[in-house]
Amino acid sequence: MSSHDSTGFKRMGPEPSALQTLGSADRAHRQSRGTHSPESEARPFSAHDLRRTCATRLGQMQVPGHVIARILNHKQTDVTSAVYNKYQYLKEKRQALDLWGAKVARIVSGLKSVGASPTEA
């Protein structure tokens, strides 16, 4: 399922076309690596790199590991989570992703967060 939110961004979901869209974007990015300008400060990256960075930064922001795992859509393997706990953690995931969105916005705009160390911006 996918839909457009108020920002105009397409939300990804479990329907095949949405997943193909993400795969197509990743493929296009990988193919464009050959056109990488040596003067550019940006290094090539993959969609997996973005997932890892998000998970790492959420951990640094004290987001609980079980919430990060659910954001990444990892399968719950312990019996309690897999069988008994059917709570979807939507509120917690939204709060964590709002934190991450604010962090990305600060990075992109060149601003440092209040009290951030030089390496944290």
Image (cartoon, rainbow, N blue to C red):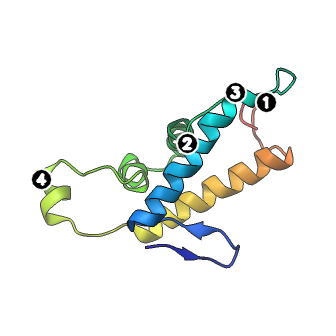
Of circles 4 and 1, the one toward us is: 4
Is 43 positioned to the left or the right of 79 in the image? right
The structure residue drawn at horizontal position 36% and vertical position 54%, both measured from the top left corner, is 73
* Marks 2 and 3 close (CB-CB < 8 Å): no
Crowdedness of circle 1 by 10 Å Cα count: few (<14), some, many (20+)? few
Say which mark, if any, is on residue 118.
Answer: 1
Q: Is disc 2 placed on a helix, strand or loop?
A: helix
Mark 3 falls on what kind of element?
helix
Image marks 4 and 2: residues in contact by CB distance under 8 Å: no
Residue type of the residue flagged with mark 4: Val
What is the x, y in percent for residue 78? 16, 48
Q: Left or right: where does residue 88 sit relative to residue 22?
A: left
Q: Which mark is residue 34?
A: 3
Instruction: Looking at the image, tell me whether mark 3 or mark 4 is earlier in sequence order.
Output: 3
Q: SS for tag 1?
A: loop
Q: Is the Cβ of the residue at disc 4 closer than 8 Å to that at disc 1?
A: no
Q: Is residue 111 visible?
A: yes
